[in-house]
Image (cartoon, rainbow, N blue to C red):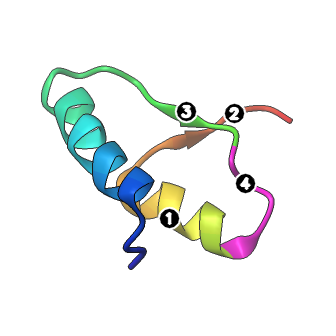
Amino acid sequence: MRSSKGYEQVEPLVELAHTYGIPLASHNHDCEENVAESQRRQVARSPS
């Protein structure tokens, strides 16, 4: 798990979006780690 400030700020937003049924997408899929993180968060991959 990452420990950066940005990561700490994003996690609560992801949880809120899921709570209220707001779809999420990520453009950050340039490496396997980022793709795995998006899958863990249940965030869709946006088109490249």
The answer for how far apart the CA atoms under marks 4 and 2 are is 9 Å
Left or right: residue 2 compared with residue 34: left
Q: Residue at x 40, y 63 (%)?
A: 40
| Residue at (37% x, 57% y) in the render | 5
The residue carrying pointer 2 sits among few (fewer than 14), some (14 to 19) or many (20 or more) residues within 10 Å by Cα, namely few
Q: Position of residue 47 (x, y in %)?
A: 79, 32
Q: Toward which corner of the image does residue 15 lie, by quadrant?
A: top left
Indicate whether 4 appears above or below 6: below
Q: Are circles 1 and 2 on residues that touch, CB within 8 Å?
A: no
Q: Secondary structure at mark 1?
A: helix
Q: In which quadrant of the rendered image does the N terminus lie? A: bottom left
| Nearest the eye: 8 or 1 | 8
**Residue denoted by label 1:** 37
Q: Which residues are magenta?
A: 28-32
Q: Amino acid at mark 2?
A: Ser
31 is within the stretch colored magenta: yes
* In contact (CB < 8 Å): disc 3 and disc 4: no
The residue furthest left is 19
Pointer 3 with pointer 2, Cβ within 8 A: yes
User: Which label sits on residue 25?
Assistant: 3
Question: Which mark sits nearer the N-terminus, 4 or 2?
Answer: 4
Q: CA distance from mark 3 to mark 1?
A: 12 Å
Asked whether, in this view, residue 30 is left or right of residue 39, the answer is right
Residue at 27% x, 35% y is 13
Q: Where does residue 12 sit, x and y in percent of width and height?
A: 21, 43
What residue is drawn where x is 42% and y is 74%? 2
Q: Residue beneath label 4, please?
A: 29
The three-letter code of the residue at mark 1 reads Glu
State the residue position of label 2.
46
Q: What secondary structure prevails in the magenta region?
A: loop
